[in-house]
């Protein structure tokens, strides 16, 4: 068995949350009388710390960012549970993986929001380690969350695989000296992901199993 620890991104890898993120940004724009949401910019920044996603998706001055963050969190809580779902194959694959591997999540979401959503989706109990934005000093693409997972679970980089849908996830894994697996169904294109030369590229979540053989 090559790997002992599998570290997954959440948004765009385990769960399809794009609709809830865009809807929350649209509500923030309405609250602040902004012209609207730059959907392409917001989509490209999903996976980064929330402040950066808001700056990418909304045309607002820096002074308004704290208010926009609070409004976003309020609206996300109101909309996310009805608009977020697991990608096909995630639940069954996690059921199988947890028998032989330690599983972890490294996400830019707020910790409590992440835990609540994972419980809602029925996958919280599959994971031995979960890190959200408040758990590290530096968010993605810094390696902090991956390093914390490896340290907490006492697994070396060469036995760890980071799985994510954005270039930030792949860079995070590489900077932690772990192998990486890019998924093409999330928020970055296959061409963008290939540019960072991940160890593996897969088109469906269940294909992660092929990286472990």
Image: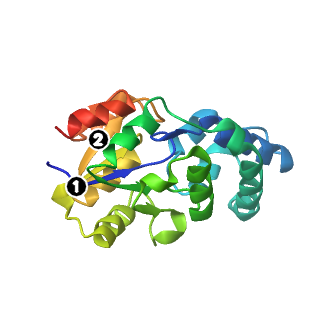
Residue 187 lies, in percent from the top left, at 48, 35
Q: Nearer the viewer, residue 40 or 25?
A: 25
Q: Position of residue 24 (x, y in %)?
A: 72, 44
Q: Which comes sooner in the sequence, label 2 or label 1? A: 1
Residue 115, quarter of picture = bottom right
Quarter holding residue 70? bottom right
Residue that appears at 71% across and 38% down: 82
Between residue 209 and residue 195, name the one nearer to us.
209
Image quadrant where residue 201 sits:
top left
Callout 1 crowding tier (Cα within 10 Å): few <14, some 14–19, many ≥20:
some
Q: Which mark is residue 181?
A: 2
Residue 209, percent across and down?
27, 36
Q: Which mark is residue 4?
A: 1
Circle 2 SS class: strand
Residue 99 seen in the figure: yes
In screen coordinates, is 2 left or right of 129? left
* Circle 2 crowding by C-alpha within 10 Å: few under 14, some 14–19, many from 20: many
Up/down of 150 relative to 188, above or below: below
What distance separates the C-alpha of mark 2 from that of mark 1?
15 Å
| Left or right: 179 in relation to 83 | left
């Amino acid at each position: 068995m090559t790997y002992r620890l599998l570290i997954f991104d959440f948004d765009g890898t385990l769960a399809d949350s794009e609709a809830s993120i865009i809807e929350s940004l649209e509500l923030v724009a309405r609250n602040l009388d902004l012209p609207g949401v730059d959907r392409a910019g917001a989509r490209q920044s999903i996976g980064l710390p929330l402040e950066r996603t808001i700056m990418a998706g909304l045309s607002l001055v820096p002074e308004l960012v704290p208010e926009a963050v609070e409004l976003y969190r309020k609206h996300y809580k109101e909309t996310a549970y009805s608009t977020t779902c697991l990608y096909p194959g995630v639940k069954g694959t996690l059921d199988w993986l947890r028998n032989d591997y330690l599983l972890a999540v490294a996400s830019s979401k707020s910790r409590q929001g992440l835990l609540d959503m994972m419980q809602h989706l029925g996958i919280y109990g599959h994971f031995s380690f979960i890190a959200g934005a408040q758990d590290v000093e530096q968010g993605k693409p810094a390696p902090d969350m991956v390093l914390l997972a490896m340290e907490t679970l006492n697994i070396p980089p060469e036995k760890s695989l980071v799985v994510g849908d954005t270039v930030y996830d792949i860079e995070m894994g590489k900077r932690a000296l772990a192998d990486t697996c890019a998924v093409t169904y999330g928020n970055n294109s296959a061409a963008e992901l290939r540019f960072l030369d991940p160890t593996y590229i897969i088109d469906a979540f269940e294909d992660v199993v092929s990286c472990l053989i």
